[in-house]
Every structure is written in C-alpha cells, then in structure tokens.
Image (cartoon, coloured by chain):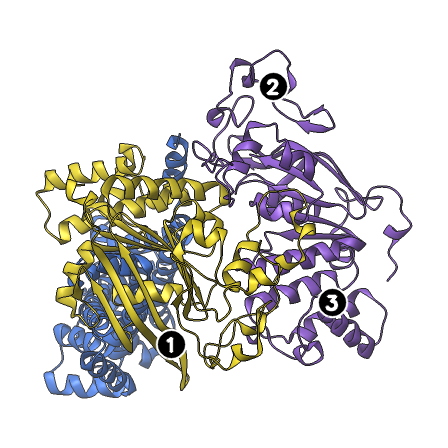
Chain colours: A purple, B yellow, C blue
Amino acid sequence: MNNTAMTNTGPILALQNLSVAFPTKDGDRAVLDNISFTLHEGDVLGLVGESGSGKSLSVLSLMKLLPPNARIKSGKINFLGQDLVHATENDMRRIRGRDIGMIFQDPFSSLNPVRRIGDLLTESVLRHQKVSKAVARDIAIKALADVALPAPAERIDNYPHQLSGGQRQRVVIALAGINNPSLLIADEPTTALDPTVRMQVLALIKKAATKRSVILVTHDFGAAAQICNRIAVMYYGRVVETGTAEQILTAPVHPYTKALMAAVPRFSTEHAFAPIPGDPPKPTERFDGCSYRPRCPAAADDCRSIPPLTDVGGHSIACWRATQPGLPS
Amino acid sequence: MTSSVTATPTRLLDIENISVRFSVGGRDLHALRKVSLHVDNGEIVGLVGESGSGKSTVAKAAMGLYPPTDGTIKFADQDITHMGLRARREIWKRMQLIFQDPYSSLNPRLTIGEILAEPLEAHRMGTRDAIRARTAELVADVSLPAETLNRYPNQFSGGQRQRIAIARALATAPDLLIADEPVSALDVSVQAQIVTVFKDVIARRGIGLLIIAHDLALLYHLANRLVVMYAGQVVEEGPTKDVIANPQHPYTFSLIKSSPEPVPSAFAEDGFRAIAGEPPSPFDPPVGCPFYSRCPVAAPDCTTTPTSLRQTTPTQKSACLYPDALKSKGLLS
Amino acid sequence: MSATVTASRRKDRTALPTGLVIGLGILVIMGLLPFVLPLLGAPGADVINLYDRFEKPGSLSHLLGSDHLGRDLLARMAVGFKWSFAAAILSTALSLAIGAPLGLLAADQSGWPRRVILQIINLTMSFPSLVAAICLIAIIGQGFMSLVLVLGLLTWPVFARIVYAESLAILEKDYVIAARFMGVKQWRILFRHVLPALRPSLLATTAFHFADMLIAESALSFLGIGAPIDSSTWGNMLADSRSFLFQAPWMMLVPAGAIVLVVVSANLIGDGISTLLRGRSQRSL
C-alpha cells in the first residue's frame, strides 16, 4: 500500500528528449520529437493539443502501450527511479494498475460489460495487494464512496449498463486509483460528458491529485485550466510551450498557444473567439523547421529551422519570434 | 437573400406544446413534455441542455422522424405535425438538418461533388451543367477549395466534413437549418471554425438556424436567442445576452457555472461549479420541478407544483417558481 | 498537400491478398485445361480405350490414370470442370438474382411485404433441401437447366437474408437519413446508397455460395439426378468410381480432389474479397 513515492523526494516522472517514430517505406516518420517534462508529487500536468499533436502518444509511450509498429528512438523515461524505456513487459504489467492508473476517454468501452463493477475493482486490488477477498471488497466500496457514487455498498454489485455515463466515469476513476498509484493518467476523460457531469469528473480528478501526480490529456484548454498547475502545449509531435498554468493561461507566448486559447469560447466579448487559421497538418505531411509555420501569422524566414524549447522568463517556448529579441512578434 | 428579409420577420418554425413519448420495453419514456419554441428568419436560436434533455428529439420531431403524441408543429404557417411523405419532401427542401457526426453523415463511397449534387438532382433544380456550377458555389460558400468536389469524404478532417455537410444542407436554398450538435464531435480548435461558417451563412442568406449544443459558452458567441431544456422540458428562454447575464432558472445558472473557461485556477474559487446529482428518470418524470433534486435554491413546494414557462422579465421566460431566489440567496449578483 | 495521401492509397489498393491470388490462379488454370490439353496431344475425355483400362496415375499416356473404360481421367476432370463450373455459376447467379431483390424489398418495406418475404424465406429454408431437390427434379425432369433452376430456387434465401440484415443497418445510417431529407426518392436511395454498400458482402457471399453450389451439383450428379449420366462431370466420375473403389481408388480421388481444390479456391477468393473490401472501407471511415 505505502508506495515508494512517499519516501522519494525526487520527481515522480521525468521524460527526457523522448522521440518516437513509425518506420515506413520511405524512412522513419517521427511522431514524437524530443518530448521532455517532469512531474513532482501533487503536480497536475495538462498535455494540451489538437488531435494528432502527439499528446496521447506521449502517455502511451510512457505506459509502454504504443502501437506495435512504433519505436522509441531515443530519450529517457524515469519513473520512481526506474528506467521505463528498457523495462520488460512483465515489469510494465506490474507498474500499470499499481503505480500508474489510467482513466480513458470513453467510460462505455473501458468497462467490461459482462462483469460486475465490484469484480473489476476487487480483482485489481487482489492482483496488486496481498489482502483477503473480504478486505479487497471493503477497499472497493471505499473507493466507490471516494468518487461519490451513491450507495456504493449496493452499487458494487451492478453491471456497467445499470449506471449512467457520469457514474461509469466515476467507476473508471475509482478503478484507476484503487491501488494508490503514484501517477494517474487521464486521457480526454471529459470529452464524452455533459457540462455538469464534466465538472464533477474534473473535481474528482483534482481531488485524487492531492496524494499523487496527474497527467491530463485534453484538447480543451478550458478543462485543463480547471485542475492543472502545469501545462505543456503540444503541436505535431513537439512541445511548443510549457510552464505553470498561470503563465500559460495569463501570458501565453507561442502563437499556437494563443490561437488555441482563442478557440475556447468564453462568456465575454472582450476575448476574441476565433478559429485557428488553416487546417491541422495531416500525419503524412512533413515540414522543414517549425511545424506551425504554415498556419502562423508571425512566420518568417528563420522559422525554416526548428526552434528549440528555450527558457524565457521562467517558462519554455519553442518559437523563434519569442526567443530571438529584436524581431517583430 | 432578397430585400424582403429585412422587413418584418417571418415565423419559420413554430413548435407548440409538443409531447413525445416512446414505448420502451412496455414502459413509457417521456422524451418531450409540452415543449414550445419558435425560430424566425434571420435568427439563430440556440437549444441547450444535457444528453437526455430531449434537445435532439425536438430536432427529429421537427423533421418528422418522431410524430408528437400531442401539440402542433408549424412550418411557415403550415401545419406539418402529421404530414405525409410526399408533401414533406417539399418541406424538407425548405428545412434542412445537419447531423452531429460528420463522419457518418456523408456516404464514404460518393465524391463530394456527387454528395452536393444529390439534393439538386432530387428536386430537379437545373440542368447537369447548372448543378455542377451550383455545387462549385456551395463549396466556396463554406470556404473550401474547388478541387474538394472530386475528392472523397475520407480525405477530409472532421471540421472540413462538417463544412461539407453544411454546404449540402444549403443546396436547396432552405429557409431554415436545424443543426443537431454540429460541433460536439469536433476538437475545440475546430469548433470556432464551424461557428464562423454558420454566422456567415445566416447573415448572408437571412435564413433561420436552430442549433442544438451542450456548450453554452459556444452558443453565447453564435445564438441570438437561447432555449434551455432540462429533462424533456423547456426551463428558460430569452435573448442570449439576458439569459447569460441574468439567468432566470437555477439550471441555466449551473450550466453557465459549469462552462470551463481557460482562466487559471478558476476551479478553486467557486465550489458550486461542480453541481451534484443527475437528471430524473425519463420513465418516471416528477410531478413538480424536474431540477428539484439538484437545485441549490429549491423550496418545499417545488416538488408538488407543476412547472410551466412564464414571463419573468420583460424579455425572458422561466419555468422556475422562484426565479429571484438565485439573487436573494446571493448566488447571482 | 494530399498528393502523398492519394498515392499511398492507390498503392494499398493494388496489394491483393495472397489467398485471392491463389484462388483465382487455380480457377484460371482449371478453366484453361480443357482447351490446352488437346493442344498438347492428350486424349479426348470420351475416347474409350479398352487396352488402357485402370491405368495408374503417373503413367505417360494418362497423367492422372484412366478409368474402367480406359478414358483419361485428367481429360475427364478438365471437361467436368466446364460442366460443374457452369452449373455452379449459373445457379449462384439465379440464387443472387432472386434473393438480393427480395432481401432489399423486405428491408425497405416494413409492412406486409416484409412479413410475406420473411415467411417465404423461413419456409424455403425449413425444407430438407436434398429431398426437395429430388422431388423438384422428378417433376421437371433431369438436365442441365433443371439442375440450375432447382439449385437456384432452393438456395436464394442465403442471399435474401444477408441483403435483408445488412440493408436494414444501412438504411439507419445518417447518410441515408440525410439523403431522404434531401428529397431523394426511395428507389434512388436503394440504388445509390444501399446497393453499393452491400457490394463487399455480396461479392464474398457469392464466392462462398459458388463453392456450396459446386458441392451440391456434384452430390446430385453422384446420386444420378444431376447431369445426364453419360456426360463427363465430377459427380458422374464419382458415381462411376463406386464400383471400383478398391481396384482403382484414383478414379474416386481425382474428381474428389478436383472438387476440394475448386471449393478451397472459391473460399480463398471469398475470404480475399472480404479482407480486401473490409480493409478499404475501414480506411474510408
């Protein structure tokens, strides 16, 4: 039960210059290019980007659940002092579910429809903890109570179809957190939900974050703003801007971050509500230099080389316009 | 399109007190209970509510897919509640539906040109050449390049597909568009694009739009008027600005508060944002206010008094017995 | 921009499943045999040579051996393919021609036409087909055309049921409902949206059904109620072999092997078609 994370003072998770590629007939196609981020206990990191930005692939690669033809080309993944890049499938099976909990987008397909929710929960407890069946059931009921499922002692014997979408997502959260993992990964957990339920789920994830760290993968800056203390904005396989939530939300620098933020509607006419110009790049497209260049209003000639992620006043930006002084932005 | 548009608005869609019931496993599912709403030309009406609130049922009832068990539906002063298929084809020419999922609403085996030509051919609107010219105009109307016509749906992104679906809906030059959650299947970054297309199309053609969504903040930027539904009933209606600034129903208030804005630690400031509970079962709708169980300002008689929409401010209607309670309890300034 | 996309898609389209290629290859070779063999100087299928009776396979004059009348088994097998292939193809076509429209009609018309068609399907399928076939042939007489007719009339529900079930699902799709709202007439919806979507499963079912028909044809001929007794068909060859099973087992093995080969290739083709089309439609989703 007591995880090593409690005694560990270093970061829970550190990704360093991670690159992932799909081999194709015409050479490797990079899908993640030099991704780095670090999480400490209590951190809630928002990985924000459009579909195809690589945000989901980032978390899949640290779970070692990449599609079979994808390969980690270079970089390090350090999780609680272990090197995950070279971890065996056996190690990973132990880590997933015990040290890393996962909340998926679709609560309808992530719960086995022919199993009672109680069986799913107690099974996970029994797999990773040395307790009796009765104790496991108590842990399961407590976990359901923690996610505010009404009447957990009765609900535990329900099948998933007997629950509403919001209740199912609560069960998914309870399942993800039942073995007290050090890291919780939530991949678009609110996309399929109604506004009021979405807020309930975000509240639960935030509550879960007090004891561990969380990665929230989302295309919605609004959702990230609710619970994240750190945000990394991804575009086409690269992190283009990262910093504290405060920095990113109040003073975004990268043109893409600004555009993505403007695309979130607010109850205010002061903020521009505008689409991002152009279309997201197709996975087969290739670019020289900054991949946002074709859509960027500030693009210039030097954008033909890749801008490195550079520290500017406490947060990091990968944009020549922001990092090279004296140029118009 | 013509100068008459700016004259007195015409009532395009007029739904009066419709109820829709389905029989599910021998039990009655009350999908809609005495719902009324209307759309005039040149107007964008936003219909908002959570899944199960009946908002999509309204769209399907208007299109004639679900005959109401009660009430009337009029289109341009013509009663279409129980209209036959032959006559309805003429109505459909003037009233078009845009589906939620742009991945399933376009036939993957046809080119965009063939898809856009289909309604024009069906209504015999011009020669082959005229139809070809018209489809080229249609893709231009939704800011897609002309070569779009020769491609297949799978060569386009979700946002582009939805623009193609809008172009198809505009083909017969309808007076009214009904869009059933047209952006919920799309990334946030693309939603604004679709909003822009709708605004542009409605302004240019002076037609009416009934747009269904669950994101109130999005409708804030698009709709002139809002209709809020909860558990099969309309609970509030009024001009968008007034409804957002001064909600007359606690459900509307909670929807506004549930809208995640990209503001730092917005969450911590306001505990009320995550409103608890879930809507009542549509099989067994409560006698009184359906929102009672989740309402922050509920009073005892809310469970027993049947609600109905009434004028509570000069511009807004609400089904709440105590529309001022939000203010008097200090939740709304 | 999307030039690369289209290029790669075209490449995928030409990548045929191996099974499909093998299956088609076998059928083509079998189909060419009756024309090629005479050119190579092989004996004709009906040439009786009593000196060459019961020749074992592998001999120079009879590659696959000869039968009790000294006829060349390879030549008889090759000619028999023409007969069996024609009978199976035509009865499959008849079955498709009756079953598909009825299935489509049942899906489209929710009222009494659906009930009637579904009842006929159930009725037809509840007959023991062999008994029914024997009775029908007894009534209309033996011959190539009556064989085709009987097989087609007894097996069309296979197509009707598949078309009915799939059309029902397609008619519920958003793009079909959208077409209806566009004012497209129902018959046009069926031809433009429903039928093309049925093509993958219809093609695969046709290949599988062809294999079934081939077996059925051989079975009926074997029983002596299929092809005319004196014609060289696989069923007749099998019937002939009965009396010499221990003396000359190859007389049975050659036609039986030919049937297995063609049935397997038809199934390979069916599988290949469904893999090919399923892959393609997945990409388009």
- The amino acid beneath tag 2 is Trp
x and y percent of residue A66 in the render?
63, 47
What's the mark number on residue C247?
Answer: 1
Residue shown at the point (27%, 84%) measured from the top left: C122
| Residue type marked 3 | Asp
> Measured from the top left, where is residue A309 in percent x and y?
67, 26
Circle 2 is placed at which residue position? A320
Q: Which chain's residue wears label 1?
A: C
Residue corresponding to mark 3: A146
Residue B117 position, x and y percent, is 19, 46
**Chain ID for label 2?**
A
Q: Position of residue A89 (x, y in %)?
A: 73, 52
Spot the residue most to the top. Answer: A326
- Seen at 63% across and 46% down, the residue is A224
Circle 1 Cα neighbour tier, 10 Å, few/some/many (<14 / 14–19 / ≥20): few
Which corner quadrant of the image does residue B92 belong to? Answer: bottom left
C31 lies left or right of A138: left
* In the image, residue C277 above or below residue C161: above
Q: Residue at x 88, y 59 (%)?
A: A2
